[in-house]
Image (cartoon, grey):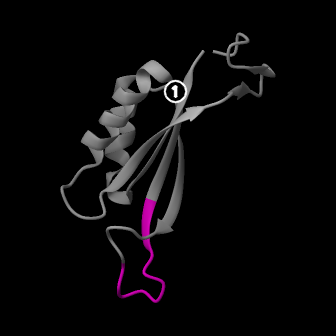
């Protein structure tokens, strides 16, 4: 089976809305990490310019990746600088630790 990794960096205050939207869409699982960085938005009052955001990572079937990315964008947008980004990357191989099998080997 063909998989994609959807990675999103969103404002921390939008995380709950994104989680709800993904749950309603039926996304089977996500990982969330608190991260710091800067891009379009920098904290000029901090010595390192870093701003706190949340990173969401999702491994999903390729045919669902675009819809998941759009779902995140719709739930996370405020229309202001620093809203974040969403990237969709190909996954070469996906192993399910419990089964010890790679995707395409009954791992789905």
Q: Nearer the viewer, residue 31 or 59?
A: 59
Image: 85 above or below 68: below
Q: Is residue 6 left or right of residue 44?
A: right
Q: Nearer the viewer, residue 22 or 101?
A: 101
Q: Is residue 3 left or right of residue 65?
A: right
Q: Nearer the viewer, residue 95 or 22?
A: 95
Residue 57 included in the magenta stretch of the image: no
Residue plotted at (56% across, 25% down): 3
Q: Secondary structure at mark 1?
A: strand
Q: Position of residue 61 (x, y in %)?
A: 51, 21
- Could one spot residue 65 in this view of the protein? yes
Image: 27 above or below 105: below
Q: Position of residue 17 (x, y in %)?
A: 31, 44
Residue plotted at (36% across, 76% down): 42
Label 1 Cα neighbours within 10 Å, binned few <14 / some 14-19 / many ≥20: many
- Could one spot residue 29 in this view of the protein? no
Residue 40 is drawn in which quadrant? bottom left
Image: 52 above or below 13: below
Residue that badge 1 annotates = 60
Q: Main secondary structure of the magenta part?
A: loop
Furthest residue to the right? 100
Residue plotted at (44% across, 44% down): 87
Q: Is residue 39 left or right of residue 33?
A: left
Write the start and end of the magenta stretch as one range: 43-53
Q: Position of residue 101 (x, y in %)?
A: 78, 19
Looking at the rendered image, the quarter that the C terminus falls into is: top right
């Amino acid at each position: 089976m063909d998989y994609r990794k959807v990675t999103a960096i969103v404002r921390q205050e939008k995380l709950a809305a994104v989680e709800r939207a993904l749950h309603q869409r039926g996304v089977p699982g996500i990982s969330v990490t608190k991260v710091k960085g800067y891009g379009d938005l920098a904290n000029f009052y901090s010595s390192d310019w870093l701003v706190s955001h949340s990173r969401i990572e999702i491994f999903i079937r390729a045919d669902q990746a675009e819809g998941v990315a759009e779902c995140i964008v719709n739930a996370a947008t405020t229309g202001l600088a620093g809203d974040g980004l969403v990237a969709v990357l190909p996954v070469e191989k996906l192993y399910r630790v419990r089964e010890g099998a790679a995707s395409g080997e009954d791992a789905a």
